[in-house]
Amino acid sequence: MGMIAIAIARIHNLFAVVMLTGIFSLLGAAAYVIMDAVDVAFTEAAVGAGISTVLMLGTLALTTSEEKPSPKKNVVGALIVVTITGAVLIYGTLDMPHYGDPLAPVHQHVADRYIGQSGTEVGLPNVVTSVLASYRGYDTLGETYVIFIAAIGVLAILGRVRFPRRREEDIAEDDAQKTPDETARETGA
Amino acid sequence: MAFPGLLNYWLIIGLMMIGFYIVIAHGNLIKKIVGLNVFQVSVFLLYITMGKVEGGTAPILAEGITAYSNPLPHVLILTAIVVGVATTSLGLALVVRIRNAYGSIEEDELDVQDDRP
């Protein structure tokens, strides 16, 4: 995944970048399966690798698919900021519980109850579904609100835009630059 | 230190920083959104590694299994993935709108058109 991420950072062809993002999401989904999060892997493969990629391809179709290389001073400054942030974050992980530790604080509170009781309280074998739809149902309701608001936002932003306008302007500009001679030749043909 | 110990966090921080770098170093708006996506996926991975229990299986109740991974981070991240797509689509819509208004999606060209250095 690291290699794909670096490739995404280096490549300037946006079409390749979008495809690599899809692959990145798919590798992420594989990592979730390894870490026992099968439901998350489903969602990531369908939504992250599928819908996101389609949305980005749509955007590429409406905009451009080549990126200009970034100026040098940007790169150096960004590298310094990123290195410092990464070092601070790694310092922060030194107190974290080790990978797979069953005594980690995350596992000490409600998770036991969810695993122990949800079978009888909700009646579904899949604990993730029980928590999502029953114990934390309001979370899911809020999530649907977010999607609804995002849809309204997209419609508000793009609803009144006439996409061909850009091209008409380009053609108009091209026409303005042409000599009368050329125009005459075109209309004649 | 038992393998992988804290290595999982460090790998994820590496990914996260690549995403962060893409966001701040590149002027192309689509590239910035891709960088945000990379960052997002690494945050998801961070949560999921915290939910993993040694010797546990996926949290689906079955006979004869006693150790399950923690389902709570899974639920939070399921919600986060969907919200992430919502924000991505909103960002991409803004990019399309900017392209329509300015004819470019490079940050420096937009600055020039706005008369800023």
Image (spheres, rainbow, N blue to C red):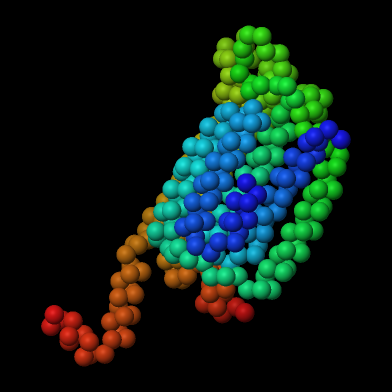
For the C terminus of chain B, which image quadrant?
bottom right
Q: Position of residue A167 (x, y in %)?
A: 33, 69
Q: Position of residue A178 (x, y in %)?
A: 28, 86
In the figure, residue A26 lies in which quadrant?
Answer: top right
Q: Is residue B22 above or below residue A46?
A: below
In the figure, residue B20 lies in which quadrant?
Answer: bottom right
Q: Is residue A146 visible?
A: no
Q: Is residue A115 left or right of residue B34?
A: right
Q: Is residue B76 visible?
A: yes
Q: Is residue B33 left or right of residue A54?
A: right
Q: Is residue B61 left or right of residue B88?
A: right
Of A150 and A87, the residue lying toward us: A87
Which residue sits at x=66%, y=9%?
Answer: B64
Which residue sits at x=58%, y=56%?
Answer: A8
Report the number of numbered marks: 0
Q: Is residue B89 above or below residue A10?
A: above
Q: Position of residue A63 (x, y in %)?
A: 43, 63
For the N terminus of chain B, which image quadrant?
top right
Q: Position of residue B82 (x, y in %)?
A: 54, 39
Which residue sits at x=50%, y=39%?
Answer: A47
Of B17 and A108, the residue lying toward us: B17
